[in-house]
Amino acid sequence: MKQQYLIITLAGSLLASCSDHKAQEKDAMNEVIKVHDVAMEKSEQVVKNNILLDSLIKTKAVDSATASSVTRNLSAADKAMEDWMHQFEVEHEGKSHDEVMQYMADQKTQIEKVNKQLDAAINQSNQYLSTQKK
């Protein structure tokens, strides 16, 4: 009888642990997705600013070297976002809980870096564009 109780208890603990692991993995994924969603909104601003800069370069006498540098930074930030999205893996079948959690932590770090790159490029382009509107 004690042996059956022990087996049932261990099985219950194992099931609860698996369920808890899945919840942790889902929470980690949601954290990554939150940062991704913020970065995606910024990607729209990158495209908008790139269009404005291209227009200025084509129609106005601006410092094309500076404008081109700003455009390159915007494009690099946009490419970093695209690259991150293409390499991000949603499915983790066959990976241990620890591997999934480490992957999600790494991905969160990477997308936060992309997010900062987007911020820097947008800020630089906004600042440059504001000097051209005068």
Image: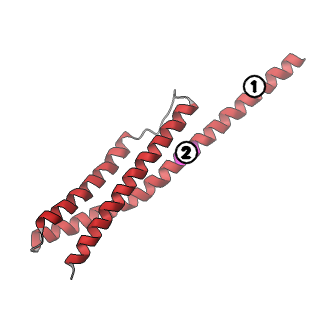
Which kind of residue does numbered mark 1 sit on?
Ala
Residue 62 marker:
none
Question: Judging from the image, what secondary structure is the residue with disc 2 in?
Answer: helix
- The magenta stretch is 26-30
The residue sitting at 9% across, 74% down in the picture is 61
Nearest the viewer among 107 and 85 is 107
Give the image location of residue 20, x and y in percent.
67, 38
CA distance for labels 2 and 1: 26 Å
Question: Residue at left 39%, top 55%?
Answer: 115
In the picture provided, is 58 more to the left or to the right than 21? left
How many other residues sit within 10 Å of disc 2, few (<14), some (14-19) or many (≥20)?
some
Residue at the spot 49% in from the left edge and 48% down from the top edge: 32
Q: Nearer the viewer, residue 93 or 126?
A: 126
Residue 126 coordinates in the image, percent (x, y):
29, 70
13, above or below 29, in the image: above
From the viewer's perspective, is 84 left or right of 103? left
Q: Earlier in the sequence, mark 2 or mark 1?
A: 1
Q: Amino acid at mark 2?
A: Ala
What residue is pinned by disc 2?
28
